[in-house]
Image (tube, helix red, strand yellow):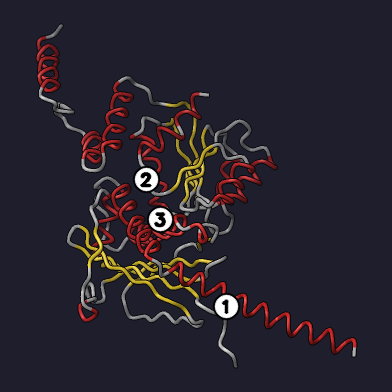
Amino acid sequence: MYQNLNYLQAVIGVIIMSDCDNTLKSSVAEAFLSTASIEYVDASVREVFSMMYGFEIEAIQIPDTDQSLCGLDERTAIVGFSGMMRGSFQVRISSMAARSIASAMLGGVPVEENGNSIDDTMGELCNMIAGGWKNGIPIFSECTLSPPTVISGRDYKIHIYKPSVELSRIYKFDGHTLHLTLHCESKGPPDE
Amino acid sequence: MPRKAKCLDAVKAAASLADIPRVFTKTVRQNAVVATYSGQFRDGTSSLAAERIETANRNGAQGMKGTILVVDDSAMMRKVVLRTLKMAGVEFDSVLEAGDGKEALACLRVKKVELIMCDINMPTMTGLQLLQQIKMERLADGVPIVMVTAESSESQVRQAILAGARGYIRKPFSIEHIVNNVKPLLTT
């Protein structure tokens, strides 16, 4: 009976923790989707683009049907978050835009079309914007960032296995378009 | 005074009266234009920093003896750090670059450096792990180490300082950040 009681306590403990975990994740998801969060994303994007590249950039709205960039010639950079918030931060732009940014980063020096510099630039772009955003929100500031991953082309699909919420923003700079997509885990695994 | 120099002085005096911030003489160097005008199109403090840097450069306040080590897994970011240091008036005799903590340790075991600029998030060995190893092996006693990173949570900053960092610059950064956070470390 003593063993059964311990087992029961353990099960109750797990249920309570699971509920707390889900409640916490819901609070995190709310903070993630809040107006302040969106403002911090926009501010971080503006800060990176003005300080590192010297570009003006602004958030825009475009129809879902018109959200392709330049056919297959796209670059996507992704960093992951872990800690209080778990999720990912993706930046997607055309290769031409990435090349323009890489050149600006080096003070206007021309950059090779398919060089490593462009992927490198993409990774740093995503890293800086993600870092600036999460550092602006107190409950996210202690989350850690993964090293960035860069994908060329657009013939891929990212699968999010856990329930998550999404935040998307689109920006315009120097005649180019930048797509930002953030995912945040919203609750624990569904009951089986 | 040679006639050309008198002429230039007169032009600069007239420019100053007309509130023209800068006069370039041919041959115009790209860096000089970028340093002056990249700040003019942002906020006032950045353009002020650009002016201050130009003044420092004219006064010859650059040219450090010795070696700098820049550690970042991004080759682009290493170039940006070196370029921004140069624009801030900080140049070294020689430059070492490392893509992660392990490479940085290999450099430090064979060459003495005068400044280390280091990222935190790197594969193989992070910046914080590198600092701990540097301290343990006494590879850079008295050398200023400045972290340059997108991570700036309070705990990360605290860990870096405890591990031996003397400065912390968050990415993205400007010339002004280098002037305020790196230059003072080189004069002490």
Q: Position of residue B31 (x, y in %)?
A: 25, 36
Of A11 and B147, which appears nearest the observer?
A: A11
Residue at image position (23%, 34%) is B36
Q: Secondary structure at mark 1?
A: helix
- Which mark, residue A128? 3
Inspect the image, locate mark 1, and give the three-letter code of the amino acid beneath it: Asn
Specify the quadrant that holds the C terminus of chain A: bottom right
Q: Position of residue A133 (x, y in %)?
A: 41, 58
- Which mark, residue A55? none
Of B7 and A140, which appears nearest the observer?
A: A140
Residue at image position (61%, 75%) is A21
Please give the chain letter of the residue carrying mark 3. A
Q: Position of residue A47 (x, y in %)?
A: 33, 51
Q: Which residue is mark 2?
A: B80
Circle 1: is it few (<14), some (14-19), or many (20+) Cα within 10 Å?
A: some
- Which mark, residue A22? 1
Name the side, left or right, on which B159 lies relative to A5. Answer: left
Name the side, left or right, on which B17 lies relative to A161. Answer: left
Q: Secondary structure at mark 2?
A: helix
Please give the chain letter of the residue carrying mark 1. A
